[in-house]
Amino acid sequence: MSKEEQQTKLESVTRNLAKFLPGGEFGPMTNRQEYEQRVDALPPEQREFAEESTRFADIWQYFSEHRMQLPKDVVNQVGGLAQLTTAEQTSVLRRVNQELMEYLYDVGEDSGVRQ
């Protein structure tokens, strides 16, 4: 590969990766309202998946902030999502989110229990 081809390829890769940086097309979003507007614009099946995924991420963040580990069965269920259809993924996430909320209710903030 010539130096010119290498440079062209490097520029292409750099442009593509820049899309994932803050401010890029696929970069992280810090404005929750903008995120919700994008979610609302999705087709119904994808929107449901995005909403359940967001709920899961919020619950996971809560667990992380309180230095709690996700229950092993939840980790196993989430680990198997890639093999499922979008509708099945949404269903699993909805069930997992419900289980985690019930778990947090059962544990309670003042119980002193750490997982």
Image (cartoon, helix red, strand yellow):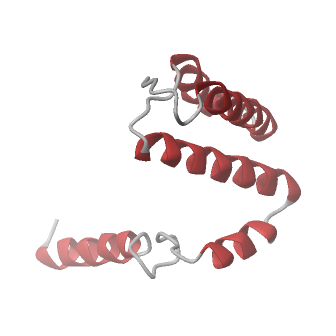
Q: As drawn, which residue projects farthest toward the front?
A: 110
Q: In this view, does 62 lie above or below 24?
A: above
Instruction: Looking at the picture, tell me which residue is in the foreground, 78 or 21.
Output: 78
Direction from residue 12 to residue 40 in the image, left or right: right
Q: Position of residue 65 (x, y in %)?
A: 42, 47
Q: As drawn, which residue projects farthest toward the right?
A: 44
Residue 108: quarter of image: top right
The mark tally for this picture is 0
Q: Is residue 42 above or below residue 78?
A: below
Q: Residue at x 51, y 74 (%)?
A: 30
Q: As drawn, which residue projects farthest toward the left?
A: 3
**Image quarter of the C terminus:** top left
**Image quarter of the N terminus:** bottom left
Q: Position of residue 51 (x, y in %)?
A: 73, 54
Q: As drawn, which residue projects farthest toward the top?
A: 73
Instruction: Looking at the picture, tell me which residue is in the foreground, 101 or 25.
Output: 101
Q: Residue at x 46, y 79 (%)?
A: 24
Instruction: Looking at the picture, tell me which residue is in the foreground, 17 or 94.
Output: 94
Q: Which residue is drawn at 45% across and 27% down?
A: 112
